Image (cartoon, helix red, strand yellow):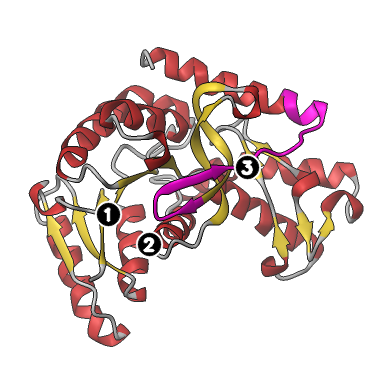
Amino acid sequence: MKKKVTVVGAGNVGASLAQMIVQEGSADVVLYDIMEGVPQGKALDLSEACPLWGSSSSVIGTNDYSPTAHSDIIVVTAGFPRKPGMSRDDLLAANAKVVSDVVENTSKLSPRAILIIVTNPMDVMTQLALKVSGFDPRRVVGMGGILDSARFRTFVAWEMGVSPEDVEALVLGGHGDLMVPMPRFTTVKGVSLPALLGQERISALVERTRNGGAEIVSLLKTGSAYYAPAAATHQMVNSIIFNKKRMLPCAAYLNGQYATKGVCTGVPVLLGSDGVDKIIELALNEQEKRDFEKSVAAVRELAAKLNL
């Protein structure tokens, strides 16, 4: 029997994610949205593509939470997107209301599900989802670090003129302007980035990674990124469905790891069928510690505005 994945939000990110899951045939999908007809129409379109993809996945579109019952994974993409000039943090109040409502309704119907939060500001929304659901912290995780790391990988690959497949990158901390790209833990076919590039070029790549989302928003003008966020979330879904226990940078609840307690932020985790199987603690140097602490402080400041 296939796993069941509910995707809340049938916009660009949610619909793209649904397509990736259904095209692969790895799970059945429920696509929920408040816009009448939108999830139903997209689900029908995806269903009609299944014969062409050789997929036996079922897709249901709904404006009602009841079809989401007994989901194995619930992905929350619903919320307001960024517009030019906005930071992820500007979305705090509006999206907190959306995420609270979604999590309250879906968690009651799927008490054993794993929650993946995509809505921005993602780290704080993950912490809010943890509070509202009352779930074990291992079963509430945020997407951000995978996307940021993918952007870092892309820019490093372009700079080096190599395939992005040969680049492994790591970004820690909050999914925002103070994220912490980690050059020392970024490699090209096993060779550390500082051994390949000078500090000036590395700093430029780090800065572009931090502004990666805003760069796309400024180009699109009426929306934000969705292909890469959906692909990043799909990687998380697959690791959970197939119990791959991949080591991925995700927003997880820290309870003493990295000398940090009571906050959700980006760290490497082993992600499997039970959610966060383990948080991997890296030995950071003094500068990396300072950058991580600064990023965590920014997340805490936003969380405090929601009394988390």
Crowd band around label 3 with a 10 angstrom C-alpha radius: few (<14), some (14–19), many (20+): some
The answer to whether residue 86 of the structure is visible from this angle is: no
Q: Amino acid at mark 1?
A: Asp
Q: Amino acid at mark 2?
A: Ile
Which residue does the numbered mark 1 point to in the structure image?
72
Q: Amino acid at mark 3?
A: Ile
User: In the displayed structure, does residue 59 sit left or right of residue 187?
Assistant: left
Which residue does the numbered mark 2 point to in the structure image?
241
Question: In which image quadrant can residue 3 be found?
Answer: bottom left
* Label located before the other in sequence (1 or 3): 1
Question: In which image quadrant can residue 17 be found?
Answer: bottom left
For the record, the magenta segment spans 271-290
Which residue does the numbered mark 3 point to in the structure image?
280
**Residue 274 covered by magenta stretch:** yes
Crowd band around label 1 with a 10 angstrom C-alpha radius: few (<14), some (14–19), many (20+): many
Pick the quarter of the image with the C terminus: top left
44 vs 266, nearest the viewer: 266
* Label located before the other in sequence (2 or 3): 2
The answer to whether residue 202 of the structure is visible from this angle is: yes
Q: Position of residue 249 (x, y in %)?
A: 57, 46
Say the numbered circle drawn on residue 288: none
Check whether the beta carbons of the residues at disc 1 and disc 3 lie within 8 A of each other.
no
